[in-house]
Image (spheres, grey):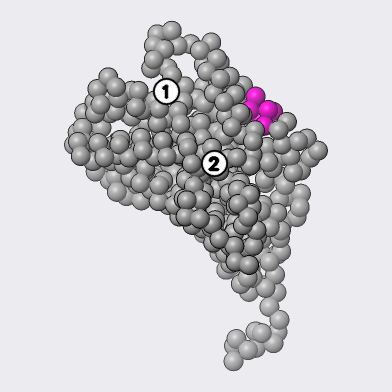
Amino acid sequence: MKQSLKLADIIAVGFMLFAFFLGAGNIIFPPIAGQMAGEHVFGAMSGFLITAVGLPLLTIIAIGVSGGSWQHLTRDLPPKVAMIMAILMFVIIGPAFAAPRTGLVAYEMAAKPFIGADAGQFSLTLFSIVFFSIAMFFAWSQGKLIDTIGKFLTPALFIGLIVLAIAVFVNPQGDIVAATGKYVDSPLTTGFFEGYNTMDTFGALMFGILIIDALKSKGITEHKATTKYLTIAGLIAASGLAFVYVSLFYLGATSSTVAAGADNGGAILTAYTHALFGTSGQTVLSVIVLIACLTTAIGLISACADYFSSICKVTYKSWVIIVGVACAVVANVGLTQLITLSVPVLFLLYPVAIALVVLAFIRKMMPNPQLAYRVVISVATCFAILDAAKVAGADMSAFSMLPMFDHGMAWVIPTFASMIIVRFVGKKEDELVTENA
């Protein structure tokens, strides 16, 4: 029997995935990048869209193509290596960086402006407890995620973003000025690395599995049907993200008048929204940010709890509490410190994640998949360590002769060269004779 979903359910699944992706980093990084890029906003935005939209979409599709789980995606790697990779990525998008960041951004942009001068460590702690308690409440009923997020929270979020986007394009608050910083000479690569900060490629590895669980709850279990609807959900989410990013980049590029000297995207958004909507602007922005951060926190906590419960005897609901409490604790570190700590880790793990996604699409071309995966992932990891060490401040001048090292992309050429080499490793002699005939 052919398995299918109603149009309303298809849209709900796509909105659910969009809501999972659209969180703290997606909102605070594009405006500051747009302001700094200035006249080079198109190049910077293009680079950002590659890593913040293109890669997550490919990752979602790769999960479906490979079989629908992390185990399928990494089946050609040693089990312990695959588990270590998964744990690292879940820790990054869970209690260590991405999930606590949702609470911090929600506090900075949705609560702190209304608290005013009284905002301090106590108010942050109290907000963190309330915020992650609500996130744990929604993540608790795993099977109901598609209804609570896809059908209720996301439409409210998307309506708010549409209103903001229309206002930005209809009534820009300033002229686009000259580029600053790294955006002067290399807007494309700088935008590319800014897209790392969203952590959405890591998120896609985990959210894709949640979407598959949601599809199963709707009766979609066949591989072909699962891949189809997973791809459709990815396209819906990617379209929504691209719409948001383009509008926020343009917002940042035209913010020099109302947000001159702002040092982060949150400050730019706050000033711009106030200029557009007056005193009610902050309320509109607060609602948008709060819903965006909350939906992402729900997805991250649920994804982490789902994975960790699958590798040990601790139950899903117990992990929801453990991860949620850890997020609330880490959130009290502070937004600036958390972002600073995360950058080297992203430079280390992103190349590995990208290599894994590409391998999922070309696996059938490899004569020896196990060898291919192990060689390519090893090469990507080794060169990513160099890039990460450089970003962390270590003296890596001895490696400056490597291609693209100055751009933080020393991993690119060796990794893709290794993919080409392993394509021809393991060929039988008669196959080689046939090809050379």
**What percent of the width, then of the height, locates residue 356?**
60, 56
- Amino acid identity at mark 2: Asp
The secondary structure type at the circle numbered 2 is: helix
Magenta span contains residue 218: no
**What percent of the width, then of the height, locates residue 289?**
42, 30
Picture quadrant where residue 271 is located: top left
Residue 305 in view in this figure: yes
- Residue at the image position 61 percent from the left and 21 percent from the top: 329
Quadrant of the snapshot with the C terminus: bottom right
Query: Residue 110, labelled with which disc?
Result: 1
Horizontal relation, residue 84 to residue 381: left or right? right
Residue interval drawn in magenta: 320-326
Q: Earlier in the sequence, mark 2 or mark 1?
A: 1
How packed is label 2: few (under 14 Cα within 10 Å), some, or many (20 or more)?
some
| Principal secondary structure, stretch drawn in magenta | helix
Determine which residue is flagged by label 2: 147
- Residue at the image position 61 percent from the left and 29 percent from the top: 136
Quadrant of the snapshot with the N terminus: bottom right
Farthest-out residue, bottom: 437
**What percent of the width, then of the height, locates residue 129?**
58, 19
Horizontal relation, residue 289 to residue 61: left or right? left
